[in-house]
Image (cartoon, rainbow, N blue to C red):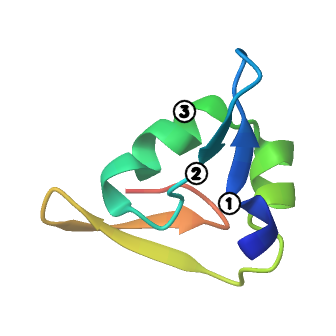
């Protein structure tokens, strides 16, 4: 996942993608298609996160 830390912004600037921060997991999922999620999280077998006091499956599927 380290290779996915740097992202290019529309302005051309580089930013740090904080994919490991549970506070933004919903926003990441909102902008990624199913195919993009599979590519992005490819090295991950399963990703769970606690969001607003509840455990949420982030990958391989997004289900509350």
View extreme (bottom): residue: 45
User: How far apart are the two marked residues, 2 and 1, measured between alpha carbons?
Assistant: 5 Å
Answer few, some or many: residues within 10 Å of disc 3's Cα (few below 14, many 20 plus, some between 14 and 19).
Answer: few
Image quadrant where one finds the N terminus:
bottom right
Front of the two marks 2 and 3: 2
Secondary structure found at label 3 = helix
- On residue 5, the disc is 1
Q: Quadrant of the C terminus?
A: bottom left
The quadrant where residue 34 appears: top right
Q: Is residue 52 left or right of residue 10?
A: left
Residue bearing the label numbered 3: 30
Q: Is residue 10 above or below residue 60?
A: above
Name the residue located 58 percent from the left edge and 51 percent from the top edge: 16
Residue position marked by numbered label 2 in the rendering:
17
Q: Camera-side residue: 19 or 6?
A: 6
Q: Which mark is residue 40?
A: none
Q: Residue furthest left?
A: 53
């Amino acid at each position: 996942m380290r290779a996915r830390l740097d992202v290019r912004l529309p302005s051309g600037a580089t930013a740090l993608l904080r994919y490991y921060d549970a506070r933004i997991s919903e926003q990441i999922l909102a902008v990624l298609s199913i195919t993009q999620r599979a590519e992005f999280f490819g090295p991950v077998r399963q990703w769970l996160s606690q969001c607003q006091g509840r455990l949420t499956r982030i990958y391989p599927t997004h289900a509350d």
